[in-house]
Amino acid sequence: MKKNKATCDANSCFMCQNCIEEWRPAICANKTNYKLRKGELIFKEGDPVTGIYFVYSGNVKVYKKWDADKELILRFAKDGAILGHRGIGDDLIYPISASALEDSVVCYIDMKFFESTLKVNNQLTFQLVNFFANELRVSERRMRNLAHMPVKGRVADALLKLQAQFGKTDSGLININLSRQDLASYAGATYETVFRVINELVNENCISLTGKSIAIVNTDALTELTKSA
């Protein structure tokens, strides 16, 4: 990662939005912005925790090892999102990895200052607790789906979630540049299986393809597939 001289607005990330205005100059004095190239690692599973990251611009994937040469994408983080919070606690080791899906800029705050920020800003602490609770619910649902939902339903669920998070382009495509391998890692399936399922969904007029991009044609049909768990 390379330091980025561009200054953020100290207003748009998860931390800044939930801090008192008087604390923002302290954030500006203690943050460091880094520019990342597509595919560049921010931190990896097993690294010692040194601080917290926030996405200033771009898209980032958060993932965990799944077998020796596979990964399971847990979530995608876009502008303003927090990264590295799973490293908070007694065992200061990142249990997950994060890397840039595209050229991105992240903001880094060291752990000591972040802990001071939590003590001063009650609203941030409250919102972080809510965020953890929501992540736990999502993780529990994810584990259930991986155990009980057929792959086709998981791919449909992944596409619906991607569209809900990133929206659509003017031409109706899901507004994120995602490889088929990353889609497979997000759905918890193999590349070959997801490739087959995508072709089936195209033939059933549930989705359409434009190059590597996907458009949802029949939302109701995809939603119905997610009910098979």
Image (spheres, grey):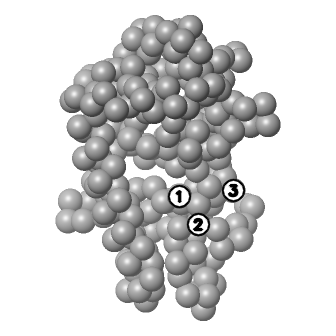
- Res 90 quadrant in image: bottom left
First in sequence: mark 3 vs mark 2: 3
Q: Where is residue 125 in the image (x, y as percent from the top left)?
A: 38, 78
Task: Mark yes or no: residue 3 visible.
Answer: no
58 versus 123 height, above or below: above
Task: Residue 4: give its label.
Answer: 3
Q: Do the residues labelled 2 and 1 touch (CB within 8 Å)?
A: yes
Point 45% across, 13% down: residue:
197
Distance from Cα at disc 3 to Cα at disc 1: 18 Å
First in sequence: mark 3 vs mark 1: 3
Secondary structure of the residue carrying tag 3 is loop
* Residue identifier under label 2: 13
* Residue identifier under label 1: 81
Secondary structure of the residue carrying tag 1 is loop
Q: Please give left or right for residue 22 compared with residue 153 in the image.
A: right
Distance from Cα at disc 2 to Cα at disc 1: 6 Å
Distance from Cα at disc 3 to Cα at disc 2: 17 Å
Amino acid carrying label 2: it is Cys
Amino acid carrying label 1: it is Ala
**In this view, which residue lies farthest toward the right?**
170
Q: How many marks?
A: 3
Task: Residue 34: give its label.
Answer: none
